[in-house]
Amino acid sequence: MASADSDTRPGEPEAIPQAVKIIIAGGFGVGKTTMVASVSEITPLSTEEVMTEAGYGIDDTEGVEEKTTTTVALDFGRITVSPDVVLYLFGTPGQNRFWFMWDELAEGALGAVVLADTRRLETCFHAVDFFERRGVPFAVAVNRFEGATDYETEEVRKALDVAPEVPILLADARDRGSCRDVLVALVTHVIRGRSPALSG
Amino acid sequence: MSHEGRRAAARHERGIADGAPVDQAGPDRTEERFLRPFAVAAGDPGGPASGGDLAPLDLLTLVVAARTPGRNEWLRPECGTILRHALRARTVVELSAEVNLPVGQVRAMVARMIADGSLQRCGPSRPLARKDILHAVLVGLRSL
């Protein structure tokens, strides 16, 4: 049973980092998983949560009017930002009926990135509203899809009706540098929000 | 083609025919699929073991093995797998991905294993203030 970990015995002291998280949210198929993969130092891991419920009209339960069991995938990546801190990036499940998982994801998060697609901006309204109501600081990243009209960030701000201090960036979820810039903008925004006297 | 595959394909075609909303398709892998029922005889999601007296287990709660997998583990292979993966501190969500079981299930098993002394919760070696964490994250991200 050789493994990379086999040289470590249980109980042996080791440096245990602080684990923190940032949420990548947005509508279905907007590029959340792509963004996680672009900046993660590991191949994004995937786990799932099982949901058992009585089908309530959304699920196709034709002929099987009983409980249905569905799974919702949860993708996450990891960045070791320092010897003491490891950052986890969680992509939120895109379908609206998986909101119950968002609460746990948002709990204790440093902040969130809301990925927006200008061809269907309304798909990120829920995410914006969710983080605003809970006071989770967020930044908006407009993922530039081919064929989409390029909008100015201020046009997007107006359409989303978010506060002037919320960072809005044009981004490419496939590009590591672009995703890094979005995350840096978010964390800078979080730090400013915590110490208003020091900003400016 | 597997039964599951056929059902998935049928579901997909039906979705298109019905003009299903966009969130029925796309690259995200949240599409429904059928699960083969399985039994894991450890942990009680509704029982007192779900966190014990301590704070409930978060996705990022760190745990580490407090003992090596023993001979009795053949009865509970998932516990043995968790112990092997937790030789170094691991988060609950990482364990879930590594042992390939749903988060809720792993959370329940981990809670039970903490209660019986197989696993230990662990905090960071150098607890940092929120301000210092944010600073470390900012510096780390900039150097990506």
Image: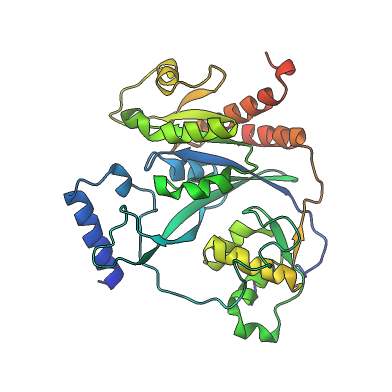
Q: Is residue A49 left or right of residue B22?
A: right
Q: Is residue B90 above or below residue A87?
A: below
- Identity of the residue drawn at 44% across and 36% down: A173
- For the C terminus of chain A, which image quadrant? top right
Q: Is residue A120 visible?
A: yes
Q: Which residue ends up furthest to the left in the rendered image?
A: B17
Task: Count all numbered tags in the image, as a single digit.
Answer: 0
- Depth check, front residue: B113 or B136: B113
- Between B59 and A37, the one lying in front of the other is B59
Where, quadrant-wise, is the N terminus of chain A in this rendering?
A: bottom right
The image shows residue A183, relative to residue B96, as above or below, that is above
Give the x, y percent position of residue B64: 73, 64
> Where is residue A188 shown, x and y percent of the image?
64, 26
Residue at screen point 71% across, 67% down: B87
The answer to which of B15 and A184 lies nearer the viewer is: B15
Q: How is the image coloured?
A: rainbow
Residue A124, x across and y down, in percent:
41, 33
Q: Position of residue B28 (x, y in %)?
A: 39, 49
Q: Is residue B89 visible?
A: no
Residue A127 placement, left or right of B34: right
Q: Is residue A189 left or right of residue B1?
A: right
Q: Quadrant of residue A166?
A: top right
Asked where in the image residue B81 lies, by quadrant, the reply is bottom right
Residue at the (38%, 65%) spot, across then down: A67
Where A175 falls versus A4 (above or below)? Answer: above
Residue furthest top as drawn:
A200
Please say if A149 is above or below B139.
Answer: above
